[in-house]
């Protein structure tokens, strides 16, 4: 397990479910999940050849249309949004003090407790 | 007074009683009982027009009961109950009272049969809800609340103007389906549009919702905008313009959601995007699509509340909801994480989750009517919403890089509220028939077909693939401490700057004019001093002498005038 020493990462302090999920800390397991995703996407793409697709528009008949559309549009979305940052992003204190973004959340509305408490 | 007891009165009575109860459990129980009684009353209402009252000479109809009103009334009651359960720990009576009044006003608005009572409840939601923002008690929250209130009250004032014009034109204030045309209907349409967060009128939502308290945002997310969707479905079904407005609404917020850092604001953007789907449904106006709007509003209120609850729980435990500060919380808040993922799967319309059986009604509605481009936009927006709400929210809060924060799991009452909400999200997705039975029109729709399930899975998993690839290649924009300019910049920066310029321009002009007059005055005084002062020409003779001179001048002038 890869654990950060500066943090209280003693698994004993974690809730049961949290301990069970600790395998996600291991990058190898994350890689496995990602490969699983690639494989599942490939299977989904192939599925298109094996069933009768009930469609409204001709473009839907294209094998794998939904997959390709989802991938391309999402990639375009992220790249456009990244570009938007150039024009739209400002410092966190841009609207201060008339904005909550620059303020800490008031402590009396919180109940900060850590697993060590 | 009326033949039936209007459900909103339960909330008003509850809000009046609450301050007299001891703090803690008794007040908490009251806030939970009120929505239950309200829902039972709504369930038993007979169809038709009831609750006629006269107010200042106006005939008001407080209870117009039909299936459209009932489904909204019920989901508002359910949302109020779940939000109150989530807010069990809150001891601030201002928040409790305002939440009750807010829910009551929204339910009142849904059942009213005339535009005057709609206006009263419309403003009621605005005034009651602003206290949920002010309850944060910071300077920023005060200013944000003021901005929110100004926008909301303006919407009500425009509505009232429209109603007055409509009465002048038609002699009726009944709240029925209208067609856009005259100034009156346009005013009412715009008033609804402001509350519904139409494009360019939307930014109050992203400004205000993340500024409310942990529990306040959950309450806010349920009512105002869905009331506006109801009002549009009631007042403007089949208005073609709404299809295009809705399509734009689904589209642009997703771009902002990708780059926004505050996760509660990301959710506010995705709320805006989901409203777009409902508005398209109203615009198409067929039975299928109007059913879709009602069903989607129902499902949306629940999964959006669930998402706001889970991010709120993180905020409650860590003091921040910013993506740049969070990460790795799945270890210590695994249940909250799971509930968040259920909300994310529901909003993303995964098969077996609520969004799947409701959003598809609207998409099918668009496809049935042959709206090719709109359908394409909605499909893109569906993929986009999965991208930012479905993946981004759980990923940056609970996974991503380890922030080192080790907060304890959310309190039990929050987990219970999230658990019930998550259960309903899945129940609706697995077995949609009871929800379909509540819809305004007969439903002949089968959501689980091979085509629908596979195409939806393709769309979603390839969106996830895009996210993974972009994340692993480092193209995905990292979460940064920042704010992004949106239309609120126009009234928070541009307008004050313009007014500042105008003021400084006028000040300059004024100072110049003042200086000019001052100089002239000094000149006159100096001239008089020269002629009448101690050294002046007039001081050399006796006053009688100067008087004779003056009279001679006046006589001369009179002669000249007479001559002319």
Image (spheres, rainbow, N blue to C red):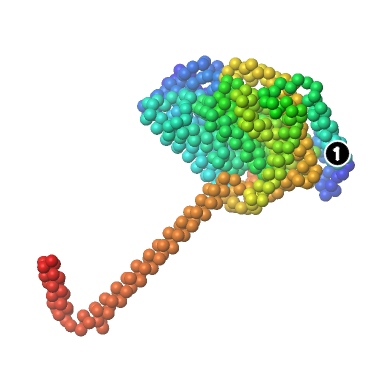
Q: Nearer the viewer, residue B368 or B58?
A: B368
The picture places residue B348, in percent across and down from the top left corner, at 70, 31
**What secondary structure is marked by label 1?**
helix
Q: Quadrant of residue A38?
A: top right
Q: Quadrant of residue B466?
A: top right
Image point 56% across, 34% down: which residue? B245
The picture places residue B158, in percent across and down from the top left corner, at 45, 37
Q: Quadrant of the N terminus of chain B?
A: top left
Q: Chain of mark 1?
A: A
Q: Quadrant of the C terminus of chain B?
A: bottom left
Q: Is residue B168 above or below residue A14?
A: above
Image point 78% across, 43% down: which residue? B471
Q: Is residue B12 left or right of residue B249?
A: left
- Look at the image and tell me whether residue B20 can be seen: no
Q: Is residue B290 above or below residue B539?
A: above
Image point 46% across, 19% down: which residue? B50
Q: Quadrant of residue A50?
A: top right
Q: Is residue B153 left or right of residue B434?
A: left
Q: Which residue is mark 1?
A: A31
The picture places residue B383, in percent across and down from the top left corner, at 70, 34
Q: Nearer the viewer, residue B74 or B187?
A: B187
Image point 69% across, 49% down: which residue? B481
Q: Nearer the viewer, residue B555 or A62?
A: A62
């Amino acid at each position: 397990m890869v654990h950060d020493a500066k943090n209280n990462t003693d698994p004993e302090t974690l809730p049961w479910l949290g301990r069970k999920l600790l395998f996600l800390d291991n990058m190898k397991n994350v890689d496995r999940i990602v490969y699983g995703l690639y494989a599942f996407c490939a299977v989904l793409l192939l599925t298109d050849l094996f069933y009768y697709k009930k469609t409204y528009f001709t473009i839907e008949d294209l094998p794998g249309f939904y997959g390709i559309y989802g991938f391309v549009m999402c990639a375009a979305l992220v790249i456009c949004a990244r570009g938007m940052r150039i024009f739209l992003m400002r410092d966190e204190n841009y609207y201060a003090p008339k904005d909550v973004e620059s303020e800490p959340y008031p402590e009396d509305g919180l109940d900060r407790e850590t697993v060590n408490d | 007074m009326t033949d039936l007891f209007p459900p909103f009165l339960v909330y008003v009575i509850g809000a009046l009683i609450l301050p007299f109860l001891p703090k803690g459990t008794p007040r908490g129980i009251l806030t939970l009982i009120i929505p239950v009684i309200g829902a039972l009353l709504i369930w038993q209402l007979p169809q038709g027009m009831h609750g006629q009252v006269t107010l200042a000479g106006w005939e008001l109809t407080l209870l117009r009961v039909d299936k459209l009103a009932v489904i909204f009334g019920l989901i508002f009651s359910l949302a109020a109950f779940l939000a109150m359960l989530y807010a069990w720990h809150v001891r601030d009576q201002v928040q409790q009272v305002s939440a009750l009044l807010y829910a009551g006003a929204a339910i009142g608005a849904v059942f009213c049969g005339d535009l005057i009572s709609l206006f009263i409840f419309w403003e009621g939601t605005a005034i009651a809800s602003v206290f949920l923002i002010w309850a944060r008690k910071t300077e920023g929250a005060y200013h944000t609340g003021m901005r929110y209130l100004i926008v909301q009250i303006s919407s009500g004032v425009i509505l009232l103007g429209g109603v007055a014009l409509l009465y002048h034109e038609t002699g009726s204030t009944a709240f029925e389906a209208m067609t856009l045309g005259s100034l009156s209907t346009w005013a009412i349409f715009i008033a609804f549009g402001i509350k519904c967060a139409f494009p360019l009128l939307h930014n109050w939502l992203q400004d205000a919702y993340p500024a409310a308290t942990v529990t306040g945002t959950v309450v806010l997310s349920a009512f105002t905008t869905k009331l506006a969707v109801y009002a549009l479905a009631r007042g403007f079904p089949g208005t073609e313009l709404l299809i295009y407005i809705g399509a734009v609404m689904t589209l642009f917020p997703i771009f902002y959601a990708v780059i926004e850092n505050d996760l509660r604001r990301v959710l506010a953007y995705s709320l805006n995007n989901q409203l777009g789907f409902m508005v398209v449904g109203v615009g198409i106006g067929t039975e299928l699509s109007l059913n879709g709007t009602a069903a989607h509003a129902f499902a949306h209120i629940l999964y959006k509340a669930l998402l706001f609850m889970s991010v709120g729980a993180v905020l409650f435990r860590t003091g921040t909801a910013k993506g740049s500060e969070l990460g790795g919380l799945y270890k210590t808040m695994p249940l909250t994480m799971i509930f968040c993922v259920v909300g994310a799967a529901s909003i993303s319309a995964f098969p077996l989750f609520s969004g799947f059986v409701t959003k598809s009604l609207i998409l099918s509605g668009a496809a049935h009517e042959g709206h090719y481009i709109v359908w394409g936009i909605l499909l893109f927006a569906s993929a986009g919403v999965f991208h930012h709400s479905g993946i981004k929210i759980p990923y940056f809060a609970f996974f991503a890089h380890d922030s080192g924060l080790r907060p304890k799991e959310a309190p039990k009452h929050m987990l219970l509220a999230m658990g019930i909400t998550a259960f309903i999200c899945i129940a609706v997705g697995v077995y949609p028939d009871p929800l379909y039975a509540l819809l305004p029109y007969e439903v002949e729709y089968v959501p689980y077909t091979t085509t629908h399930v596979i195409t939806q899975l393709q769309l979603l998993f390839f969106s996830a693939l895009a996210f993974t690839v972009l994340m692993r290649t480092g193209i995905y924009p990292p979460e940064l401490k920042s704010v992004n300019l949106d239309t609120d910049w126009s009234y928070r920066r541009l307008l004050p700057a313009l007014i500042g310029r105008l003021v400084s321009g006028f000040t300059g002009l004024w100072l110049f004019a003042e200086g000019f007059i001052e100089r002239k005055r000094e000149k006159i005084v100096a001239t008089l001093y020269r002629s009448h002062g101690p050294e002046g020409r007039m001081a050399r003779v006796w006053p009688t002498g100067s008087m004779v001179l003056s009279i001679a001048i006046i006589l001369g002038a009179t002669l000249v005038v007479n001559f002319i």
